[in-house]
Amino acid sequence: MKRAGTMFAVLSILIGGLFFASVFLDIPLFKTIGTELLLLAERLLAALLFFTIADTAIMLIRKPGNDSGMRIVRTIGFGVFLAILLLGLIKGPDSTELNHPVFFVQQMVEASLAGTVCISLIFAMYRLPGQAPTVMKVSFAAGLIVFLLIYNGLPQIANLPAGFINVIEWLESIPQGTLIGLLIGIALGGAITGIRFLFSGKLPAKEDK
Amino acid sequence: MQTTRMASVIILIMAVIYLICRLIGNRSKLVGRTYNREKDLLIRHHIAVSLEESAPIHLDLGDSGEAVLSGGAALAAAGAAESVSAQMVFADEPWVITAPGGIAVNIQKNAVRTGMEAADYSSSYSSDFGTFSGVSPIEHLTGNAAALEKAPSALHLSIGSFGAVPALTDTLYNEGEVLGIGGTDLISQAVGTVTADAVYVGEQYTEIPEALDKTEKKNSALLAMDVMRWVVIAAIVVFAGFGLSGL
């Protein structure tokens, strides 16, 4: 097991080194190796997706669930999976006969979900004042009120002085910055977890105890 | 290629920072990290409630595609599974893991086994720990509802990309059931802010494995993350300053 871990680490370092060499060195051989490595990774991921689909199908057949609720969910899930697979095999993956019904059903479910989510969120907002206030929840509620006021057109009707308009324009730019900040955070989190896993070969909770 | 080069530079910087933190981390007095934020205490409290009241804990991984195998959320969820399993070896009620695919379930099961081995109770391991609960977020929700219909859980901890589904999850669970979310997409983080009891925003989802365990640890990856956080904040402030001054 330890030997396999060492081999995995050596292989990872080798591949990583070759890839970084292809990025930073302008040598045609390394450029080709870098492109081929990316292509290989894409193909491996595509193959992995097939394994995941097969694995999911096998799991649905072998473990239909211990209770009635799970059995119903999994039977319906497996039925839909089989129907789409058969339609895809008969009509081809790009045919409108396959894509139209699949996307139609998907859109219906997503529209229903979006509607229910709106109701659930309004209900959650209604319950919010009754909950223990946290910085996040208070900021969320305050942000919601401010942006509802900004985007409902009131500032345009109210004929506000130029100073206020500048403040509103500045406020309007905040969501974009916040969004980018969150995405940077999520990406950095993923990268550092990956680096930690590569270097330590252990799951996060095991390291440095 | 320019973007790849930039991303490679950032990853290399992060790797170097991580290695430096790894080298000095355990010796430095500066890195005694404990997680005693309100949300961490709440989650740990409900792990204790679970043990006392025999109410199960539910850990949910919500990524899909290849991210479910090697993405940050999958690794954080595996770390969380390991951390919880080490604490739940004496639990009367088996706790539940739901994940969007058989391979993902097996990775989580492996993490559970590792956690139990770490606590010297590998004999408590059962193969019934993981449950496949649907690949798409909505299928995942119905799968979870079916998997958890037996008894109210003390804690639901969801890590990954769930879209707007946490809004529905909130209505699905009972009043006393605590919901924690470590979202890796923007919608689940926004929805989680109003519906969840504990929300891990942005990169905080990587802190969940540590936050679950009350023993004090020094973790070089999280220290590196803190360093990167300040580097990014400094970069934003500097460039915003340049922008405002017209340079």
Image: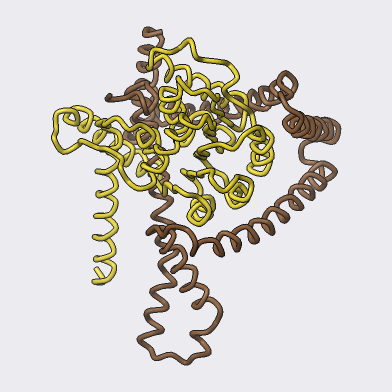
In the rendered picture of this protein, how many numbered marks are placed on residues?
0
Q: Is residue A107 left or right of residue A37?
A: right
B164 w.r.t. B142: above or below:
below
Q: Residue at x 52, y 84 (%)?
A: A154
Picture coordinates of residue B117, whole percent (x, y): 41, 14
Residue name at image x 44 percent, y 72 percent: A172
Q: Quadrant of the C terminus of chain A?
A: top left
- Closer to the camera, B94 or A86? B94
Quarter of the figure with residue A87: top right
B92 shown above or below B185:
above
Chain whose colour in the figure is yellow: B
Q: Is residue B134 visible?
A: no
The percent coordinates of residue A118 (x first, y second) are: 64, 61
Tell me which residue sits at (42%, 78%) in the image: A168
Q: Is residue B6 visible?
A: yes
Residue A202 locus on image (x, y percent): 37, 22
